[in-house]
Amino acid sequence: MEVILKEDMASLGKIGEVVEVKDGYARNSLIPKGIALEVTPANLKVIEAQRKVKAQHEEEKKQKAKESADKLASISCTVAVATGEQDKLFGTVTNNDIAEALKGEGVVVDKKDIVLEEEIHKLGIYYFKVKLHPEVEQRVKLWVVKE
């Protein structure tokens, strides 16, 4: 029996795909649990409409991410830290520190989206990436200075 998947399933496929499964599996498991729909012209139209709406939302998210990336491109953030002898930091500069510095610059970024290219143990200039969208990331300059 052919069914249209309403959810991603690792063993079968992704949302909106038409897959062939055994009749009993479709009737007793997939369709009652709301994981799949039987293939009919009406259901195909519904799934296609949902796919178009989802694609439009993804494109809007991508555009917002590009706008944020343009804003980040013009920013160089500064983190002031306490240092010891020979300008060695007490600890390291973390993603949270960088997120707070970006917030001070007027850009709100989740600390999980910040990717450090190297650990920061000394004063100086570093670069990090901000992943705004699976297809959009921006490289930003970071100044680590004494408090």
Image (cartoon, rainbow, N blue to C red):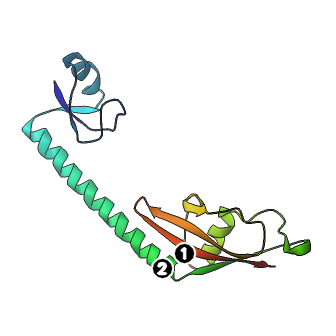
Residue shown at 28% from the left, 32% from the top: 34
Mark sitting earlier along the chain (1/2): 2
| Residue 47, quarter of picture | top left
Query: From what the image shows, is residue 112 above or below residue 9?
Result: below
Q: Is residue 138 left or right of residue 59?
A: right
Separation of residues labelled 1 and 2 (CA atoms): 8 Å
Image coordinates for residue 85, horizontal then vertical, percent: 92, 72
- Residue at the top extreme? 24
- 75 or 32: nearer the eye? 75
Image coordinates for residue 142, horizontal then vertical, percent: 65, 75
Residue 107 numbered mark, or none:
1
Residue shown at 34% from the left, 29% from the top: 11
Q: Which residue is mark 2?
A: 71
Q: Is residue 55 left or right of residue 1?
A: right
The amino acid type, in three-letter code, at marker 1 is Val
Q: Residues within 10 Å of mark 1 (few under 14, many from 20)?
A: some
Residue shown at 12% from the left, 45% from the top: 45
User: Which image quarter is the C terminus in?
Assistant: bottom right
For numbered disc 2, what is the local secondary structure?
helix
The amino acid type, in three-letter code, at marker 2 is Lys
| Residue 26, quarter of picture | top left
Image coordinates for residue 88, horizontal then vertical, percent: 85, 70
Q: Are marks 1 and 2 in contact (CB under 8 Å)?
A: yes
